[in-house]
Amino acid sequence: MTTVNERLAWRYATKKYDASKVVPDDKLERIIEAVRLTPTSSGLQPFELIVISNAEIRAKIRAVAWDQAQITDCSHLLVFAAWDDITADRVNMMFDLTNEIRGFRNEGWENYRQKLLGIVAGRGTEANYQAAARQAYIGLGSALIAAAFEEVDATPIEGFDPEAVDEILGLNAKGLRSVLLMPLGYRAAEGDWLVNLQKVRRSRENFVTEIK
Ligand SMILES: Cc1cc2nc3c(=O)[nH]c(=O)nc-3n(C[C@H](O)[C@H](O)[C@H](O)COP(=O)(O)O)c2cc1C
């Protein structure tokens, strides 16, 4: 049986995709579902996923993303877009959804709602956005692991102009800001300078401190 870590050793930040290969719908859906199942602080899920197969839109995004060819050569481009603010309406939406799905109201939960409403009101828009963006990174981690599990190649991408991507996708009108891009697809048989290079990670000794 293949372990998760074997798959993580197999994956790499793919630099060249085979533009003729398409990720099948079932694999794509499982990767998306892994992002949807990602845990987030207070369960707010303060980000959304945009899945782009449209070639013209991807060409526009590539132009504001350091001309990275993965964006146009991949099969699907994921855009992780965080809430531009954590408003009272958004907090209440998730707390109400919890009550609706679970079918009951709980005093402890309602007290926590009030506490959280106070925190987000006091923190301000930019800090709330930053908090939301951190949750999007957790989603990115889930997507990377899920893609590796599905033997789909992926590239996490921070190298882009977020405001330009927001403009291309009309994200401001939706109260969202782009945080991360992630091409999904299949590595090209030739022409990827990274594919055969050894993975570089600090040793366990230089990475883990055990306190017993
Ligand atoms: C948040 C984040 C942003 C990244 N941005 C880019 C990027 O813009 N372009 C790129 O080619 N690789 C990007 N990378 C890939 C990293 O350079 C790569 O994951 C790291 O060097 C480890 O190598 P590996 O993923 O091949 O194991 C990014 C990775 C992460 C996690």
Image (tube, rainbow, N blue to C red):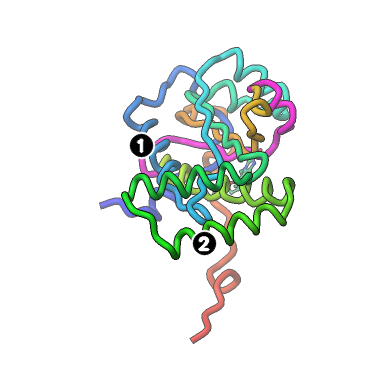
**Residue at the far left in the pictured view:** 1
- Closer to viewer: mark 1 or mark 2: 2
User: In this figure, what is the number of numbered marks?
Assistant: 2
Image side of residue 208 versus residue 4, left or right: right
**Looking at the picture, how far across and down is residue 193, in whole percent?**
60, 36
Q: Residue drawn at (68%, 52%), measured in percent from left and top?
A: 121
Mark 1 is on which residue type? Arg
Residue drawn at x 56%, y 14% as measured from the top left: 55
Q: Which residue is label 2 attached to?
A: 112
Residue 128 counted in the magenta span = no
| SS for callout 1 | helix
State whether residue 158 is above or below residue 41: above
Q: Residue at 48% x, 87% y: name it.
A: 212
First of labels 1, 2 by sequence position: 1
Q: Residue furthest top?
A: 56
Mark 2: which secondary structure? helix
Does the rendering let one see residue 17? no
Q: Quarter containing ligand 1?
A: top right
Q: What amino acid is found at the position of numbered circle 2 in the picture? A: Tyr
Distance from disc 1 to disc 2, alpha carbons, whole Å, reads 32 Å
> Range of the magenta residues?
148-169
Which numbered disc covers residue 111?
none
Question: In this orientation, which residue lies closer to the viewer: 134 or 111?
Answer: 111
* Residue identifier under label 1: 30
Q: Position of residue 129 (x, y in %)?
A: 68, 45
Q: Do the residues labelled 1 and 2 touch (CB within 8 Å)?
A: no
Camera-side residue: 63 or 113? Answer: 113
In the displayed structure, 162 sits above or below 149; it is above
Point out residue 176 in the picture as x, y percentages from the top left corner: 63, 34
